[in-house]
Amino acid sequence: MKRIVTMFLLACLIVLGAGCGKDSENKVKDLDFTVVPDGEIPAELKAAIEERKQNDFKLTYSAEQYLYLVVGYGAQQSGGYSIQVKELYLTDSNIVLDTELLGPEDTAESGSEASYPYIVLKMEMREEPVVFR
């Protein structure tokens, strides 16, 4: 009986280890991107952002030779938020984007109106799936 339990636990560890390895693929290279100013976002993409901005969202959009990656953090109680791109890189099979919402530095200047922080990144067209972290 101990042998069966030991084999079962070993099998579980192997499965868990294989799953973790898949999520942490090796970085092949960093990818170049541009943060798109609000006035330069394609109209169709801008409409999609407006539909989703109340809640957290992540989306991709392609137009011509560009791929757009968008991350929104939903409704916030005030303004003054910013979004930091921690990493954007290519693995063997994916594009990985990691962002972070940064709170207002000075709450007195952030106002009392709700805001809907999001970031739009533009990069060269790629076919790999995007993993948002």
Image (cartoon, rainbow, N blue to C red):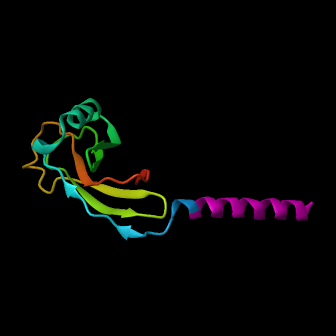
In terms of secondary structure, what is the magenta stretch mainly? helix
Q: Position of residue 34 (x, y in %)?
A: 20, 57
The residue located at (21%, 53%) in the rendering is 103
- Asked whether, in this view, residue 17 is left or right of residue 99, the answer is right
Which residue sits furthest left?
109
In the rendered image, the quadrant that contains the C terminus is bottom left
Corner quadrant of residue 88: bottom left
- Asked whether, in this view, residue 111 is left or right of residue 23, the answer is left
- Magenta segment includes 6: yes
Q: Position of residue 86 (x, y in %)?
A: 30, 63
Q: Position of residue 76 (x, y in %)?
A: 23, 41
The residue located at (11%, 47%) in the rendering is 110
- Asked whether, in this view, residue 39 is left or right of residue 9, the answer is left
Asked whether 106 or 30 is in front, the reply is 30
Q: Is residue 87 above or below residue 111?
A: below
- Magenta segment includes 91: no
- Asked whether, in this view, residue 24 is left or right of residue 36, the answer is right
The residue located at (13%, 50%) in the rendering is 107
Which residue sits furthest right?
1
Q: Which residues are magenta?
A: 1-21
Which residue sits furthest front?
64
